[in-house]
Amino acid sequence: MEDQQVGSLRFNIDFSQPLYEQVIDQVRSSIAKGEIALGDKMPSVRELAQLLKMNPNTVMRAYQELERDGLTEKRRGQGTYVTSSPERVQSFRADLAARYIDNFMEQMKSLGLSWSDIQQYVSQKSNSEQGGPQT
Amino acid sequence: MEDQQVGSLRFNIDFSQPLYEQVIDQVRSSIAKGEIALGDKMPSVRELAQLLKMNPNTVMRAYQELERDGLTEKRRGQGTYVTSSPERVQSFRADLAARYIDNFMEQMKSLGLSWSDIQQYVSQKSNSEQGGPQT
DNA sequence: TATAGTGTATTATATCACTTAATACACTTA
DNA sequence: TAAGTGTATTAAGTGATATAATACACTATA
């Protein structure tokens, strides 16, 4: 429930998922939404570990996956930086979106629901809320 | 990869998820799609365990959650049966669909994607395949 | 009344993912 | 030289998952 802030990064950590996955997801999201700028310096492993009250190894694990995804770059002795390449962010975003969508379509298929069923549900939902499904 | 069949139930078990979750998901799906009829007898705990090469306790765990969901009923000394109530199946299906959809919308939001972005992706995908996104 | 087949409960054990802890090393900057 | 980077290693603890071996109460049936 408690939000943690470090630089332009926000974190909201709970116990519903592995800690390293939550760090990955929330950094990803910040980059995808442009909340943290390309080329920006990330908090150091130790600094983030202390802030989020977790072990440096746990943060390391998250940082390593972010680098594998091409979203961050490491510079020896200097630190971790958000990639400066908008293309990498874009392609990662597209890949991840495709994965999410495919997974979702599988779930709908397992319930025997069609795409029009889904559209109907979403349009109902967006009418009962303000602003609709757009971010 | 190997499909297992017992009565009108099909199972495809791998090691990507906990075994009991896979049993739950696949029985749910069979009921939601009407592949197994309302009121039908389910395989016994021991029978399914032997077929799927897992421990009876693991199958039991799955069966208990299916009953909690209202999708099955147990009769002492007789066995486990699919519920005879179409209403229960419908309401469960709606609940689960809502959960899936909300989760999906959260994922899209975390990537900064709008509902129209998603529709565009899905319509592209259904054009490059046969039959479209309907089941 | 036996017997076999139901679901259920218990106890023990094993494995694996996740997490923490403590420490050390190589590199870069100041 | 000192402080701050990422990284690697070893050890330990916890909880979820799964198996194994039994045992019990209930029901249908021969």
Image: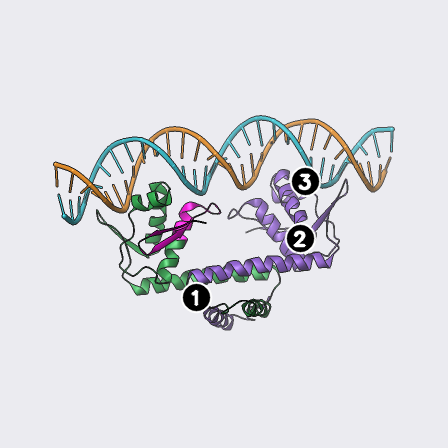
Chain colours: A green, B purple, C cyan, D orange
Quick one: label 3 or label 2, which is nearer the N terminus? 2
Q: In which image quadrant can residue B100 be found?
A: bottom right
The one of B48 and B28 positioned closer to us in this rendering: B28
Foreground tag (1 vs 2): 1
Q: Residue A22: within the magenta?
A: yes
Image: magenta residue range: A2-25
Front position in the image: A119 or A124:
A124
Q: Which element carries disc 3, helix, strand or loop?
A: helix
Is residue B35 something that shows in the picture? no
For the point 42% across and 46% down, the residue is A19
Distance from the alpha carbon under mark 1 to that under mark 2: 38 Å
Q: Position of residue B35 (x, y in %)?
A: 68, 58
Give amino acid for label 3.
Answer: Arg
Q: Are marks 1 and 3 in contact (CB under 8 Å)?
A: no
Circle 2 Cα neighbour tier, 10 Å, few/some/many (<14 / 14–19 / ≥20): some
Asked which quadrant contains residue A87, the reply is bottom left
Label 2 sits on residue? B9
